[in-house]
């Protein structure tokens, strides 16, 4: 488990995301006026490090949020990606 860099759950407040542990890329649609996303990323190993970038300053159009999980022993890194599309 120390070398585990996966997520066991990924949620977006106010968004619909069907999380599957083996899927690394997701697409979501949010209202035009959305300027930030509230994301909860739960690692499989609670001692793994999770970093989220790109969720705080959304602009009109496509945005990419990256979630990087580093295993407890730092031997593995997994990256998950969420692409946001605006509703026009």
Image (cartoon, rainbow, N blue to C red):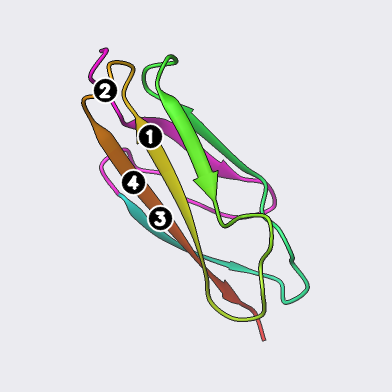
Segment tinted magenta in the rendering: 1-23
Q: Earlier in the sequence, mark 2 or mark 3?
A: 2
CA distance separating discs 4 and 3: 7 Å
Q: Look at 53% across and 76% down and name the residue there.
A: 62
Marks 3 and 1: in contact by CB < 8 Å?
A: no
CA distance separating discs 4 and 2: 13 Å
Name the mark on residue 80.
none
Q: Is 40 placed above or below 72 here?
A: below
Q: Look at 54% across and 50% down and name the residue there.
A: 53
Q: Secondary structure at mark 4?
A: strand
Name the mark on residue 79.
4
Q: Look at 67% across and 74% down and name the residue there.
A: 59
Q: Earlier in the sequence, mark 4 or mark 2?
A: 2
Q: Earlier in the sequence, mark 1 or mark 2?
A: 2
Q: Mark 1 or mark 3, which is nearer to you? A: 1
Tell me which secondary structure the magenta stretch mostly adopts: loop
Q: Secondary structure at mark 1?
A: strand
Q: Residues within 10 Å of mark 3 (few under 14, many from 20)?
A: some
Name the mark on residue 4.
2
Q: Earlier in the sequence, mark 1 or mark 3?
A: 1
Name the mark on residue 81.
3
Q: Residues within 10 Å of mark 4 (few under 14, many from 20)?
A: some
């Amino acid at each position: 488990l120390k070398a585990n860099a996966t997520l066991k759950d990924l949620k977006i407040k106010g968004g619909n995301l069907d999380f599957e542990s083996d899927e690394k890329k997701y697409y979501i649609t949010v209202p035009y006026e959305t300027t930030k996303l509230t994301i909860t990323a739960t690692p499989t190993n609670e001692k793994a490090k999770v970093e989220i970038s790109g969720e705080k300053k959304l602009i009109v159009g496509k945005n990419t949020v990256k979630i990087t999980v580093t295993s407890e022993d730092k031997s593995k890194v997994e990256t998950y990606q969420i692409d946001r599309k605006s509703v026009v």
